[in-house]
Every structure is written in C-alpha cells, then in structure tokens.
Image: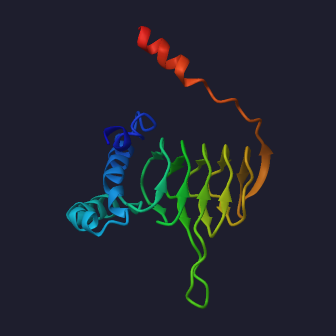
C-alpha cells in the first residue's frame, strides 16, 4: 500500500506541490473501485480531496482517472484532466493543460484522451476528444491536439502536427543502478 501511494514521489523530486497532489490522488483512488462500502467509507476523504485539490490547488484530477506511476505535475495550476482519460507511466504535464472530451450537439460526449508512456506536455496544451498519444511523445506549449500522435515524435501547433521523429532510446537497466546504490 505504501509503495502504491508514493509511486510518484521520485518523479516529483523537486516539486512539493506535485508530491502532495499525487499522494492525495493515490489515497483517493481506492474509492473508484466498484465497492459501495469502500466508497461510503471514503466519502469524507473524497470531499476533502475535491475541496483541497480542485478548489484550493486548482488541479482537476478526478480520483477515478487512470494514471500510471511516475506522473509529474510541473507548476500544478489550472490543470484539467477528464476523469475518463488514461495516462501512461512517467508522464510529465505542465500547468494550464487540458485533457478533455467533446460535447456533441445531441448531448453525448466523445471519448477522452489516452496518453502513452513517457509523454511530455508543454504548458497550455489542449488535447480534446478520443485522441491517442503514442509513447515517447513531446507536445509543445500552446498546442491543440485533435488527432492521434504516433510514437516517438514531437508535435506542435494549432492544430498540432508532427515536426520531428525521435530515435527511440533503449530503456535503462534499473536493477544495475539499484545494485550500485545498495553497495554504497
């Protein structure tokens, strides 16, 4: 349980607000399970979470949102993430970012954005609708994304377009790093 709650701690190393929000988010997340008893038990905490995180810290991150480990909130202010969005591992989201859906004329809503692993969003990025963002993608500040972005690229603009393809980087072997730290 402790490792679950603090899974974003290292990613927000120099970011106290990000650490606080993600710990509170991870503590609220069990209330999204299909267990009515747990939901009722968690109700006072969920009220605190909503008031403190959304109203005081100005970060809309519903407790039922699927967020992978290592989520980094840079300058967490005016951040709006639709609760049906899915965010992969090791994503970096800056201030004034919106992940939202579209309301159609008939009153129905589109799907919400899905971000792959290792996605970095600049400030003031809007990703709207059932858009899929691939793994290892960088989206520049002020971009408006309304179409899918493939893996390993940089996208910018309004509407966002791919301007550069990135060379995939081989993942670091973490166990070697952990062994070295244990020896010290």
Quarter of the picture containing the C terminus is: top left
Q: Position of residue 60 (x, y in %)?
A: 41, 62
| Image quadrant in which you'd find residue 65 | bottom left
Scheme by which the image is coloured: rainbow
Q: Is residue 70 above or below residue 88?
A: above
Q: Is residue 68 above or below residue 144?
A: above
Q: Position of residue 9 (x, y in %)?
A: 39, 37
Compare residues 113 and 35 and report the one nearer the observer: 35
Question: At x 48% / y 57%, what residue is drawn?
Answer: 66
Horizontal side of residue 40 vs 79, given as left or right: left
Compare residues 29 and 151 and report the one nearer the observer: 29
Q: Is residue 156 above or below residue 83?
A: above
| Image quadrant in which you'd find residue 152 | top right
Question: At x 77% / y 35%, what residue is drawn?
Answer: 167
Quarter of the picture containing the N terminus is: top left
Residue projecting furthest to the top: 184
Q: Position of residue 3 (x, y in %)?
A: 36, 38
Q: Position of residue 156 (x, y in %)?
A: 71, 54
Compare residues 167 and 35 and report the one nearer the observer: 35
Question: At x 46% / y 66%, what residue is drawn?
Answer: 83
How many circles with numbers are drawn on the protein? 0
Q: Is residue 165 above or below residue 53?
A: above
Compare residues 113 and 78 and report the one nearer the observer: 113
């Amino acid at each position: 349980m402790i490792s679950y709650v603090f899974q974003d701690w290292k990613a927000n190393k120099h970011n106290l607000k990000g650490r606080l929000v993600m710990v509170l988010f991870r503590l609220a997340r069990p209330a999204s399970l299909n267990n009515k008893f747990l939901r009722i038990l968690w109700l006072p905490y969920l009220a605190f979470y909503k008031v403190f995180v959304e109203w005081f810290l100005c970060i809309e991150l519903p407790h039922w949102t699927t967020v992978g480990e290592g989520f980094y909130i840079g300058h967490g202010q005016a951040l709006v993430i639709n609760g049906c969005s899915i965010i992969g591992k090791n994503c970096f989201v800056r201030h004034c970012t919106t992940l939202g859906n579209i309301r159609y004329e008939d009153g129905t809503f589109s799907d919400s954005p899905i971000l792959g692993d290792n996605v970095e969003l600049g400030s003031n990025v809007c990703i709207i609708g059932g858009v899929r963002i691939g793994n290892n993608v960088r989206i520049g500040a002020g971009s408006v994304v309304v179409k899918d972005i493939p893996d390993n690229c940089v996208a910018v603009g309004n509407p966002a377009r791919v301007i550069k393809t990135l060379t995939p980087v081989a993942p670091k072997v973490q166990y070697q790093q952990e062994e070295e730290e244990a020896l010290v």
